[in-house]
Image: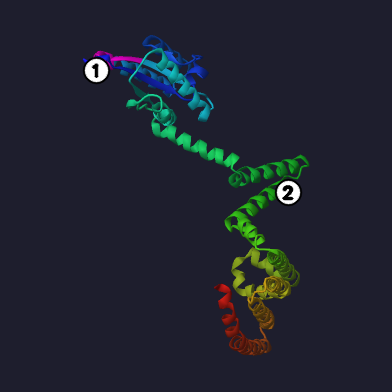
Amino acid sequence: MAEQTERYLVLCVDRDDDLGEKAKVRGPVIGREDVLAAAMKLALADPEEADANAIFAAVKKYDELKSEGMECEVAIVCGNKERGFAADRAVSRGVDAVLRARPFVGIVFVSDGGDDEHVIPVIQTIRPIVSVERVAVKHSQTVEETYLVLGRYLRMLVFDTRYSKWALGIPGVILILVGLLAVFGAVLAAQIAALLIIGGAALVRGFNLDRYIATLLSRGPASYIRLFATVTSTLVVLVGFGSGYDYMEAQAGNLAAQVVSKPSLFFVYGAQLAGYFITGSLLLIWVGLAFGAVGSLLANLARESSRWRREAFLLVMLALLYFPVTTFSAFLIHGQSQSTILLVSYALVGLAMIFGLTVAVYPRVRVRAIPERE
């Protein structure tokens, strides 16, 4: 007898207000006939709308409870198309309006899953939810949840600066630059510029160069010396590669053309071409590497770090290796026995000097570096 006096509300929530936006029906909607009419309007406005199925399911649940002799009512409460706080506040106000019309001891919540179930905590603060009925619509709840997750990631790509500069900034620069070049008829230049920008962005992100530079600049004035030396060293080395190619073209252009036309000739002329390339590029490449080592040396001196000795040791190694590499390039070009003797001599002298420096200097560097690590 006590159960017959209890009244329950069968509630369907349309959090994003599809009922108002598509069917032009304002919530809340109370009563079986009005709810059924609203569901039909929404289904006619958008036959693929999942909320229409949830409303029909709420009416069905209402009929089932009525047939069991329970006192109940069915209603629809709408939120806001913007979702979020505005939608939850609208749902809360709608539930309050329904509960003021008639007293209910509990709520039977009917939902198609996904976004609408976000309001369950909001409703529970107003009246207990005694049952949750989820409608398994054929469009699948998983699909709706996938759209929600995809929407969150898209918002991150647009509004989070950590991602938007790569997802929108780089493509924006490419589109503007390609558009400007295309206006002036430089289609090939536009394609090359797009490839360079994409390649540069991939290089920076792939090797974490942006974070490396940011970390480097946060370590004080000495880091600026290291950064300048690193960038300059890289540029000089790249110019060295270009210089080596130009020298090879100037000295053995015909051989290079033959190798390009018939790759099997690489095994015949490859060593000679490599020798010309090394001869033309070696000086600039060595200058670039030395510039980077000098920059690190100066940065460590500015920080009063004992690690400057390591860079000084590297400079000595570069100086000792220059002559063997030069002789090796001459050997590749001419193949003379005199070059072989010089190469072995330079290698032995360099090995002896490196061994002497290692025995005399490295133990002191290692001992002095230990307190710095601690």
Q: Where is residue 64 in the image (x, y as percent from the top left)?
A: 27, 17
Q: In which quarter of the image is the C terminus?
A: bottom right
- Sort mark 1 into few (<14), some (14-19) or many (20+) by Cα contacts within 10 Å: few
Kindly identify which residue carries mark 2: 189
Which residue is nearer to you in this view: 371 or 111? Answer: 371
Q: In this view, does 266 lie to the left or right of 34?
A: right
Tell which residue pokes out farthest to the right in this image.
184
184 is higher (above) or lower (below) than 16: below
Kindly identify which residue carries mark 1: 3
The magenta stretch is 64-73
**Residue at mark 2 to residue at mark 1: CA–CA distance:** 81 Å
Q: Report which quarter residue 10 is drawn in.
A: top left
Q: Is residue 71 magenta?
A: yes
Which residue is nearer to you in this view: 270 or 197? Answer: 197
SS for dot 2: helix
Tell whether label 1 touches label 2 (CB within 8 Å): no
Q: Where is residue 344 in the image (x, y as percent from the top left)?
A: 63, 88
Q: Report which quarter residue 308 is drawn in.
A: bottom right
Residue 328 seen from this side: no
Give the amino acid type for the residue marked by disc 1 in the picture.
Glu
SS for dot 1: helix
Tell which residue pokes out farthest to the left in this image.
1
Give the colouring mode of the picture.
Answer: rainbow
Q: Is residue 92 left or right of residue 348?
A: left
Give the amino acid type for the residue marked by disc 2 in the picture.
Ala
* Residue drawn at x 67%, y 48% as measured from the top left: 194
